Image (spheres, grey):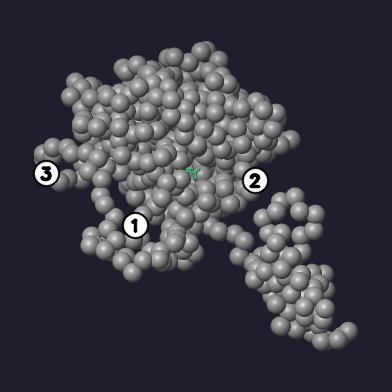
């Protein structure tokens, strides 16, 4: 066998062994599959000469290395993904025609837990909401329930989101997070009081990813086979029991391990101690809305007046084998819906329905839904085509619809729901703001320890605010939520209670 044949032989071996995880010998190849002769020494012009540009292995290795990073998520950059399954346990066909809810149906899921504000390598002990995003690979296409571990949100209109995130992210001047900046923003946003009460309570630092609930936050719509619409809120209830950390506990953990929550998840899954969550829903009809003293489509509100019903259970049981390919490239989007589940008119959710797929086209490319972690388990049949990284099996001359040659039929059952519309187009706040009452309810439900932790946690950030007006407006929000909370917090930050009262309506 001449040298050329030998080389060819090695190249063939490389092809044979690709994908054989336990193969003893795996020849090293370049991206074109050809064997690498020397991966330790660059190709030089003799002993003292320069490196030759024709060393394609060197050039390719450096090029690929330089392109390893993609933009991190603009929010929720730090995350941990886990595979599992969801089993539906209650017949809710009267509410939704979605097959994922059909009693007894098992659906594979991928969940990504995350922190929100800081970057990909930041500690997991920070006070921050935790993202709780679930991709259900249903047999009618993918449905993503992209929620958080807290039941409400800071704002109720998507137009405020970029400003809110800018204020919470590190300063563009110092690259440090600064309470002076975010409390300046929130002093204009009284509806944030409820979420701030959750966030500065012990719930703001969950002990790990298993011992926390998840919430859909928004109202969604469920549609049954007759086209009847119900409004619904989703709640994942942990079977592990809720466990939060005090500031002191978090500081102690952070000093030793800034990946404690990810480590906890890997260890528990490896030990076969699979975490489980029950999925609950609360249901309302549109006819109930007028009688409520709050807007049920306002993401700063819970439906405290409605009881919840269990509809299934999720078990997480497998860690990704490649963090980048699965967790980092996962793309959850509120626009990933299936027949029987739709967004409600919640103004925050409506913005999210656009924003996620948009950022993912930038972060991962136009064809990110073809990546294995995002790909539907059912056939994808449409004429969206081409673009960078396209892997679809488009092999027809017909790339349009309708056609008499290769038609793709529409499904009448998958039409969006109908809703009567009245009124004039407008740019106006919602009518029933009711900004403070649920924050007060939450505070009064806390134990004495939880109340005093909330006040000291809030005081430690609000106490850093130099602008007296900002500080007192924020104090007046908490005073309007609950007089005891407002008074104690005012004392804790050396505020002026008379001024707080005068700012309170
Ligand atoms: C209008 C308001 C909001 C906007 C514009 C927005 C926008 C975004 C964007 C751009 C991302 C990055 C997505 C990616 O790169 O893949 C993201 C991630 C995320 N957001 Fe929001 N967000 C909003 C509100 C919310 C709310 C209310 C929740 C919770 C109910 C939430 C939960 C999440 C989660 C869990 C992730 C991480 C998903 C993952 O693990 O990949 N967001 N958001």
- In the image, which is nearer the foreground, mark 3 or mark 2? 2
Q: Quadrant of the C terminus?
A: top left
Which residue matches tag 1?
382
Residue found farthest to the top: 448
- In the image, which is nearer the foreground, mark 2 or mark 1? 1
Of the image marks 1 and 3, the number of the one nearer the N terminus: 1
What distance separates the C-alpha of mark 2 from that of mark 1? 31 Å
Percent of width and height locating residue 203:
52, 26
Q: Name the residue: 37% across, 19% down.
A: 308
Of the image marks 2 and 1, the number of the one nearer the N terminus: 2
The mark found on residue 321 in the picture is: 2
Which residue matches tag 3?
424
Q: Name the residue: 77% across, 78% down.
A: 5
Q: Nearer the viewer, residue 336 or 378?
A: 378
Q: Nearer the viewer, residue 330 or 340?
A: 340
* Local SS, label 2: loop
């Amino acid at each position: 066998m001449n040298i050329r044949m030998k080389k060819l032989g090695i190249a063939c071996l490389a092809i044979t062994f690709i994908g054989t995880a336990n193969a003893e010998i795996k020849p090293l190849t370049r991206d074109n599959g050809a064997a690498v002769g020397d991966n330790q020494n660059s190709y030089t012009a003799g002993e003292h000469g320069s490196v030759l540009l024709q060393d394609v292995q060197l050039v390719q290795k450096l090029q690929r290395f330089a392109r390893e990073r993609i933009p991190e998520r603009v929010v929720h950059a730090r995350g941990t993904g886990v595979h599992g399954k969801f089993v539906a346990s209650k017949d809710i066909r009267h509410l939704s025609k979605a097959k994922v809810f059909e009693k007894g149906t098992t659906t594979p899921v991928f969940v990504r837990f995350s922190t929100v504000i800081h970057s990909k390598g930041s500690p997991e002990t920070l006070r921050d909401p935790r993202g709780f995003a679930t991709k259900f690979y249903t047999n009618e296409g993918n449905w993503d329930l992209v929620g958080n571990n807290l039941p409400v949100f800071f704002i109720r209109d998507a137009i405020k989101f970029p400003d809110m995130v800018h204020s919470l992210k590190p300063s563009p001047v110092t690259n440090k997070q600064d309470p002076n900046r975010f409390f300046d923003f929130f002093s204009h946003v009284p509806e944030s009081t409820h979420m701030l009460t959750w966030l500065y309570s012990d719930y703001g630092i969950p002990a790990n990813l298993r011992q926390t609930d998840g919430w859909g936050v928004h109202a969604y719509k469920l549609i049954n086979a007759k086209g009847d619409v119900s409004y619904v809120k989703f709640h994942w209830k942990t079977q592990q029991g809720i466990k939060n950390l005090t500031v002191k506990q978090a500081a102690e953990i952070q000093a030793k391990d800034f990946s404690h929550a990810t480590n906890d998840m890997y260890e528990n899954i490896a030990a076969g101690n699979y975490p489980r969550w029950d999925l609950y829903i609360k249901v309302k009809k549109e006819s109930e809305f007028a009688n409520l003293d709050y807007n049920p489509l306002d993401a700063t509100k819970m439906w405290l007046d409605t009881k919840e019903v269990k509809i299934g259970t999720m078990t997480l049981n497998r860690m990704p084998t490649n963090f980048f390919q699965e967790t980092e490239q996962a793309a959850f989007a509120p626009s990933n819906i299936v027949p029987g589940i739709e967004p409600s008119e919640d103004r925050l959710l409506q913005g999210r329905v656009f924003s996620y797929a948009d950022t993912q086209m930038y972060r991962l490319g136009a064809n990110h839904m073809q990546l294995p972690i995002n790909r539907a388990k059912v056939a994808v049949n449409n004429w969206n085509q081409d673009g960078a990284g396209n892997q679809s099996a488009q092999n027809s001359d017909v790339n349009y619809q309708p056609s008499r040659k290769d038609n793709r039929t529409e499904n009448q059952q998958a039409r969006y729901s109908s809703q009567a519309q009245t009124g004039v187009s407008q740019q106006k706040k919602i009518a029933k703001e009711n900004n403070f009452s649920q924050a007060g309810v939450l505070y009064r439900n806390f134990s004495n320890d939880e109340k005093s932790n909330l006040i000291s946690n809030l005081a430690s950030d609000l106490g850093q605010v130099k602008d007296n007006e900002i500080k007192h407006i924020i104090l007046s929000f908490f005073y309007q939520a609950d007089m005891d909370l407002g008074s104690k917090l005012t004392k804790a930050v050396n505020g002026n209670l008379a001024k707080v009262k005068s700012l309170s309506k």
